[in-house]
Amino acid sequence: MNATLPQTETLEIPKPPKRLLTYFEDGGRTVGSWLLTTDHKRIGILYLYSIVAFFTIGAIAAAIMRLELITPAGDLVTSDTYNKLFTIHGTVMVWFFLIPSIPSVLGNFVVPLMLGARDLAFPRLNLLSWYLFNLGGLLALYAIAIGGVDTGWTFYTPYSSTFTNTHVVTMVAGVFMAGFSSILTGLNFIVTTHKMRAPGLTWFRLPLFLWSNYATSVILVMATPVLAMTLVLLSIERIWGVGVFDPQLGGDPVLFQHLFWFYSHPAVYIMILPGMGVVSELVTCFARKPIFGYHFVAFASMAIALIGFFVWGHHMFTSGASVYSGLVFSITSYLVAVPSAIKVFNWTMTLHRGRIFLNTPMLYALGFIGLFTVGGLTGLFLAALALDVHVTDTYFVVAHFHYIMVGGMVTGFLGGLHYWWPKITGRLYPESLGRLAALIIFIGFNLTFFPQYVMGYLGMVRRYHAYAPEFQIYHVMSSAGASILGVGYLLPLIYLIWSLKHGKKAPANPWNATGLEWQTPSPPPKHNFAQTPIVTRPPYQYSAETEEHMVYG
Amino acid sequence: MTVLNPPIVPRKIYGLIWVVLLLLLLLNWGLAQLNLGPFNLVATLAIAFIQMMLMLLYLMHVRYNTPLTWVFVAAGFIWLVVMINLSLSDYLTRGAVAGRFGKSWIHETSVPPPVYLPKP
């Protein structure tokens, strides 16, 4: 019977190329190929350049302030200049470093890889986000260059809308534009997570970084329009004298605070949730154990995103808001501590009986857990209505939010950057230097900010460039810590750049990790995967007993 | 519906919605000429709500979209309600102070207006 069948031609199956071109090589190496790229990985790196530049500007402003505060007298800069310095520091660090740091840099790079997708859902929109972000940043820098702004990063009215003679509208326009970048990025992540998951990658098989990133994106999309609207109203009042916030024009200054904090408190969670996502990845990988309570950690991210919208009034306990609303916001602020604590407990339980590798990313993750816990618990002090009255506008508040934003988010960012650095660049960084830098940052950070808790509680008011001499010892400690912290931040900058040329070549999976991003070469090819991966298992299937060692470290 | 397959909405629907929006605008203007007391505000808000829904459902294609889009649109409104509601928890209780142990909330009838510094 076989003999009667017609002979078919043998198809020539093309052999796969020996090595896929990386995203560095594929698409060209010219500046134009980078500036017009729609590849999520390249856009992530463009964001990295941008935020490092903005971080440097914000850090220089902080360094001058810390120098000024070494002595009680205001002898280095005038009070006006000092006002402008803390405004530069706050504005640049919040909107042009912290908010885009993990989502736009690491998120852009790893989200499609973790999802098993070729790119984000809207690649051109992604590039537009980067341009809007930089345009906003340049406007903010222009405002600084032509004389600066002295309102603080919160732009409180009616001072910002009526009284100050500095360049509020230009600065606000920059922030407004960066806000659109945030909205577009958030939208892109939401659609990508819904629509572009690899076959088999169900919601409860998503890595926890993606849950955090999704929760962050929801906040970005839901909250940022309110900031845009508020800043437009502020500009309308300032330019045309239409009364919205100025009581002399029939407006209400507290309304500005309501609208501003409706965005800006959830923005705190925009800054910390991605860091929590990174830590979930790191803890489970470097303890070689599946995460403890996956569903709880995932839902805690969504709960933080949701409850984070109900707490903004705790910024206004002393601003003339009613006692009743203070009571409501105090209770809701306590509520948000519950999902945050769930995460900390789950990370701790993941460490329990794990086989812990103290590699650089893990050191950052452990630092994050400790510093975030201190920052979070002191946040409860501030949520307590009566105690908040005592410490409002003191260095206690400054220390609290730096423990969250710097101790939490920057530490999380550095942990994530080290973890995914081999994937991003295809090179390994020097591990011992990495550990040293993590240690220096931890020590420097605590020396900088812990004394601020003490002096704040004792009554040292924030935003003053001259102060009572009894606080000098704390300020000197803080400034000394800041210089150590500066060295700690400079070190990774140097050795990471060094590793680009001199670092060992990274294997596809240097940490023996389980995520999809490790199933493709380092650095990945332009379209991420030679074949669309199929997911058949839950995430984090680590085993402390069977694993011999990490490939690296 | 996906991005690649937008719905085909007949032009007459767009035209009809445009005419209805203009008629509602006229109605709004007409009602503003009458003194309905507190109902002027109710009528204006009701008309604005209908206009908004028409734009959202037909001009922004939400009616033809997937349930997931409806969820996000609804979430936008819920967020707005949260913002207004919690802000009002401040404005509607200004001057309300708690009594001593066991007593209910007391509302001071005459809260002195704040004194603002004159403009420089």
Image (spheres, coloured by chain):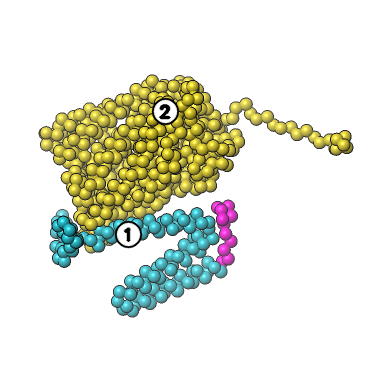
Chain colours: A yellow, B cyan
Helix or strand or loop: what does disc 1 sit on?
helix
Which residue matches tag 1? B84
Q: Which amino acid does label 2 sit on?
A: Gly
Q: Residue furthest left?
A: A469
Q: What stretch is highlighted in magenta?
A: B1-11
Q: Can residue A458 be spotted in the picture?
A: yes
Q: Which residue is located at x 85 percent, y 38 percent?
A: A6
Residue A482 lies in quadrant: top left
Residue nearest the viewer, comparing A509 with A423: A509
Let me know if residue B2 is in the magenta part.
Answer: yes
What percent of the width, then of the height, locates residue A514?
50, 32
Q: Which amino acid does label 1 sit on?
A: Ile
Q: Quadrant of the C terminus of chain A?
A: top left
Identify the mark at residue A61; answer none if there is no mark: none
Which residue matches tag 2? A354
What kind of secondary structure does the magenta stretch mostly adopt?
A: loop
Have a look at marks 1 and 2 and say if they share a chain: no
Let me know if residue A208 is in the magenta part.
Answer: no
Mark 1 or mark 2, which is nearer to you?
2
Q: Mark 1 lies on which chain?
A: B
Helix or strand or loop: what does disc 2 sit on?
loop
Measured in 3D between alpha carbons, the distance from the residue under mark 1 to the one under mark 2, in whole angstroms, is: 47 Å
Image side of residue A520 versus residue A355, left or right: right
Residue A483 lies in quadrant: top left
What percent of the width, then of the height, locates residue B4?
58, 52
Q: Tell me if residue A409 comes above or below residue A443 in the rendering.
A: below
Residue nearest the viewer, comparing A99 with A166: A99
Residue B104 lies in quadrant: bottom left
Q: In which quarter of the image is the N terminus of chain A?
A: top right
